[in-house]
Amino acid sequence: MLAFIIRRVLQSVVVLLVVGLVAFSLFRFVGDPVDNLLGQERTIEDIDRVRSELGLDQPFPVQYFRFLQGVTQGNFGVSFRQGRPVADILAERAPATLELAAVSALFAIVLGITLGVYTAIRRDGWLSNFIMTSSLIGVSLPTFLIGILLIYVFAVELGWLPSFGRGETVQIGWWTTGLLTESGLKAIILPAITLGLYQMTLIMRLVRAEMLEVLRSDYVKFARARGLSQRSVYFRHALKNTLVPVITITGLQLGSIIAFAIITETVFQWPGVGLLFINSIQFVDIPVMASYLMLISVMFVVINLIVDLLYFAIDPRLSASRGGGH
Amino acid sequence: MEAIARALDSDLAYRFRRSPVAMLAALVVVLLIGSSVFAPLITSQNPFDPGSLNLMNGFSEPMQPNQFTGETFVLGTDDQGRDVFATILYGMRISLFVGFSAVIFAMVLGVTLGLLSGYVGGRTDTIIMRIADIQLTFPAILVALLIFGVAKGITPPDRRDEVAIWVLIIAIGLSEWVQFARVVRGATLVEKSKEYVQAARLIGRSPVAIMVRHILPNTLSPVLVIATISLALAIIAEATLSFLGVGAPPTQPSLGTLIRIGQEFLFSGEWWILFFPAMTLLALALSVNLLGDWLRDALNPKLR
């Protein structure tokens, strides 16, 4: 058990170091920082001075170490395009993305589990068949087309919801939230559905498959034989046992939600980190690109690590086979 | 002739004739690919040659004669008077070219690494598979975006539009090689222990010859399935990147770029500029996907 955890954590650290190296190489070799800092009229002395100030005359490993040190202290460099520290820009943009991700995850989980349970219980009902078929079509639709479709129906034709932006936001400390104003709440509906739809269908299909499996098992038959009410059988006995895989998959999908937010944020011009990243690629703003890369990898690696460890904690078979002295 | 007769008589052809979904999907794919290959013969207008455009034709509605010139366009025109039908055919050329090239690139890379990984084993195997694991942790679209961003940073600004298509191919290809490598590695591990491989080794064939001439042909049917599904993914990935504005340059618009352009006219009521490219993309991706699903079932002996 302990050996497994240590190996897993070490592995994550190696991944992060490699990603750090890629990010650092971006900083170092793509675009010359000295070029960016000094104007046209520079002398060789100027260049040498700036190079030693920035530590660029040091050996490569030393530079890399310094870069890592800076990153762990929240120093991500200065954006080429906006001329402000990247850490500030990211902090300003992060709440929008995190709120969007949270609302979509909530939407995906609640609706996914509800529909999953429904389609499992009413297995052959016409509504279930309809839901399953439309979910197949929904999965094959590219995210950006879903977004455009929703905009067309609800913003252009019906005019119920706004098609871009966050609406009014409220400042709470350094965090800006759009969840407390009416226009903010309206603005988040379409992006959240666009972003969460794929995860919703995934969770729904998973819950349905697991439920069908569990409903065939002996203890459910026994519970029915005891004369427990349908509701109690479905929700207290069956659903509870389907939730372990659902939790793991949902956990793993959290990272994807934040990554796919890039697309949704572009469709809806949502002022989050994803839109920032796309703009940084368009304008080759290396520090922003590298920082986004670092941040998102830390998130992915941490989520994966937690899910792996959770799995280990939840499923006793794993710890028996690995930790049992083999 | 004999080869064709044998192919028509094969199990796969029989299954194909029995599946209406597969036949319909194949028909759509062939129609779309054919019409984009022969685009210059089908439409008289080359939408990317400014000389052949007439600005007066701008914003013609589908099937309605234009109010100034009286010309009629089946699918309407965009703001610059480009025939939407023609832009779709030419745009699909870029989409298909990028899709096919990216899949071939991913396939060559993935199959090679998978063969090496499975046949050589040891440290080679560990390194290749670890890289594959790490890459699988990140969504493909994110990997493609990053590679695209890095490549854009490396190329000098005045050459970016020229190389954009190739960068796109490499970025999408690199984001999809893992599936090929994993499947080929698994199949190689199985084949490696079979007698014919041992026999080939005994008569002194070189490891490269064994891998390429003996093992590779026996791993190809899952590769074919993955290649088909990857093609659908690659077409969607290309459209997504172009839609995000980081893919095909405006001088060579793909379906994704057309959708991006069309989105700007959604609010002013010119729905056809967006609608038809979007439907084409959908039809293309969905049919390729259905073909891939059918192929997977048809080639899988366990499901019979």
Image: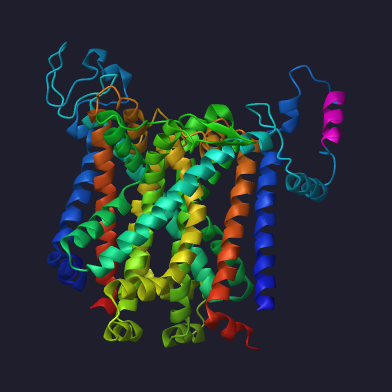
* Residue A267 in view in this figure: no
- Asked whether A51 falls inside the magenta stretch, the response is yes
- As rendered, which of B44 and A243 lies closer to the eye? A243
Residue at the spot 43% in from the left edge and 80% down from the top edge: B191
Quarter that holds the C terminus of chain A: bottom right
Left or right side of A149 for A63: right
Residue that sits furthest to the top in the current view: B68
Q: In the rendered view, would you say A203 is above or below B280?
A: below
Rendering colour mode:
rainbow
Q: Main secondary structure of the magenta part?
A: helix
| Location of residue A313 by image quarter | bottom right
- As rendered, which of A55 and A136 lies closer to the eye? A136
Tell me how many marks there are.
0
- As rendered, which of B234 and A3 lies closer to the eye? A3
* Residue B293 in view in this figure: yes
Residue at the spot 43% in from the left edge and 41% down from the top edge: A264
x, y percent for residue B51: 30, 17
| Location of residue A230 by image quarter | bottom left
Residue at the spot 60% in from the left edge and 53% down from the top edge: A299
x, y percent for residue B48: 32, 25
- Asked whether B185 falls inside the magenta stretch, the response is no
Residue at the spot 29% in from the left edge and 20% down from the top edge: B79
Q: In the rendered view, would you say B134 is above or below B100?
A: below
Quarter that holds the N terminus of chain A: bottom right
Q: In the rendered view, would you say B24 is above or below B149?
A: below
x, y percent for residue B102: 42, 50
x, y percent for residue A74: 73, 43
What stretch of residues is rendered in magenta? A45-54
